[in-house]
Each structure stands twice: as C-alpha cells, then as structure tokens.
Image (tube, helix red, strand yellow):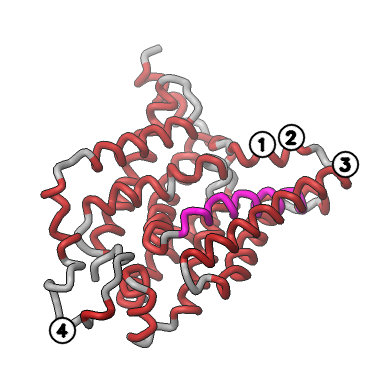
Amino acid sequence: MSAFGQVGALLQLVPVQRAGVGLLLAALGLPVVGVVIVGLDIMPVRFAMMHVALFGIAVGQLVGLDPVLCALVACGLAGAGVAPLARTADALSGAMGLLMSLAIAAALLMLALSGVNANGAFALLWGSILAVRPADLAVLGVLAVVVPALFVWRRRELALLLHDRELALCSGVAVPRLTMALLVLVAVAVAGAIRLTGALLVDALTLLPALAARRLGRSLGAITCWAIGIGVVVNVVGLLVSLAWDLPPGPILVLAAGAVALAVHLLPERRTRSWRASTSPSTSPSTYPPDSRSSSARWPH
C-alpha cells in the first residue's frame, strides 16, 4: 500500500480522527498561549507546569480520579498561586523554580508512599496522540475559544502588558488580574496538551509557533494570527507525515515546528524590520512617553 493509501485508510479510524480534531483545536489556542509566554518572558513556566501536571496525575491515580483532570486543576491552581509573585520576570522565574522543585518532590513522594505504579504517571508526560478522548477534545475546544476571545476582548491591555509592564500600570491596566488570568491560561494549556504531544513536547504546540510568528508579525494581532496559522500548518503536516511513514507524532510535530521556526529566523532581517521599528521611540512619541521605553520591550501595539 502506498503512503497516500495508508494515510487514507488510517484517517477512517476514530482514534486518528480524534487526534486530527485535537490538533486543529490545539492550533487555535495553544500557539496564542505561546505568544503570552514569549511576550511575558516566562519560559520557565512550561517546565514548572510539567512537574505540577505530574503531581496532579499522581494525585488522580492515588484517589481514583481522572489523572488528566487532576493535572488540569493542579496546573490552574498553581498558575493562580504564583501570580502574586509575578511583579517582575525575575521574581516569576524564581517562583517557578521553587514550584517546580516542590511539585516534583511531592509527586515522587506520593507515588512512593501510595504504591501507585509510577510508569502510568510518567507515561502521560510523553503523551499519546491516539489516546485522545472526547473529554480531552472538550478541554482543547474551550481553550480554542477562550484564548483567542481574550486576545480580542482585551487586545489593548494585552498589547500594553506584553510590551511593557510599567507602561501598562501607568495606563490603568489591571496588571495583577490580567497577569493571573494569563498564567492560569498558560498552566491549563500545558496540562491540556498532555494527551496530544505530552508535557515534555508541549513546545511544539505553544512556543515554537510563537517564536516563528514573532519574526513575521508587525503587531500583536498579526503575530497572533501568524502563530495560529503556523500552528495549523505544522499540526496538519506533522500528523500526515507521521501517519504516512508510521512515525511517532510527538517528535514529528516538534521537528516540523522547529524547522518552521528555524526557517523563519533565517529570513533576511529587512522582512521583519517594520514591526520592530514600530517599538522605537521615534515611531509614535505621543503614545509612549520617552521615559516609559525600556530595553525589555518586545511587542508593538
């Protein structure tokens, strides 16, 4: 059977169809979460939430509840809990390091004391795209609606916050509440991607499309649209390639997203210069006071 015939036959299977729907839903919400991660410069949050997800999985296995649901709840609570410490990127990084250490220690201790099979808990961290369930699709569907809707509803506030926290505060943005909402979304998104690529490969759905989009977009809206578009293309191509050549989908998705991000970063700088230039003080002096510009500015308005 040819590769195309094999793909066609596999697409008739319900687990493969669920995996495809899950990847499409993930492409609508998770790359936007990556835009938040890059904009707030909170790269360590991914690793911290992976460990928190493991803790939630351990709790679920111990008490007999759905491990993924427990991981979602644990990550959501953790995101809300560290939000008060997010006054600066450095403070948040330190909080995430502490959270990561405590979560992995608590998870391993719980697994050891309860006698629960640790293999099942760690297996979820690697993901199984063909094991996606209707409940997982529901979570991804909610993220696919809520995350873009938040960007449309609070576009100005998000642009200010992702551009410069101090400028957002001076402009009357409710920075603490908005930061908490973003951290909770990031945390839940990491947990929601566990069934697709696994927590350890979640960058394929979140961070890598955002990194590529940052080079292509000239505004926060454009960057968000690019991130979603890249996410859709990468997810569809990655799934089809994995089906055609009988390869594990998770690594293929990561390699496909990484290839796109690398290719975009090899483009001549002149193609992406305009949005970067729009953050310079000379672009709109009436909008940004001279003393409000900082070297950490990342996103244009």
* Residue of label 2: 119
Q: Position of residue 162 (x, y in %)?
A: 35, 68
Q: Quadrant of the C terminus?
A: bottom left
As drawn, 297 above or below 112:
below
* Residue of label 4: 286
Q: In this view, which residue lies farthest toward the top?
A: 1
Which residue lies at the image location 52% right of the left edge and 56% below the top edge? 189
- The numbered dot on residue 123 is 1
User: Quadrant location of residue 34?
Assistant: bottom left
Return the residue nearer the eye: 219 or 92: 92
* 162 magenta-colored: no
Q: Which of the marked residues, 1 or 3, is nearer the chain's N terminus?
A: 3
Magenta extent: 42-59
Q: How many marks?
A: 4
Q: Badge 3: few (under 14), some or many (20 or more) residues near its Cα, within 10 Å?
A: few
As drawn, 258 above or below 32:
above
Q: Is residue 27 left or right of residue 56?
A: left
Q: What is the CA distance from the residue labelled 2 to the residue labelled 1?
A: 6 Å
Instruction: Between label 1 and label 4, give the one nearer the viewer.
Output: 4
Q: What is the CA distance from the residue labelled 1 to the residue labelled 4?
A: 54 Å
Which residue lies at the image location 81% right of the left edge and 45% below the top edge? 111
Q: What is the CA distance from the residue labelled 1 to the residue labelled 3?
A: 16 Å
Q: What is the CA distance from the residue labelled 3 to the residue labelled 4?
A: 64 Å
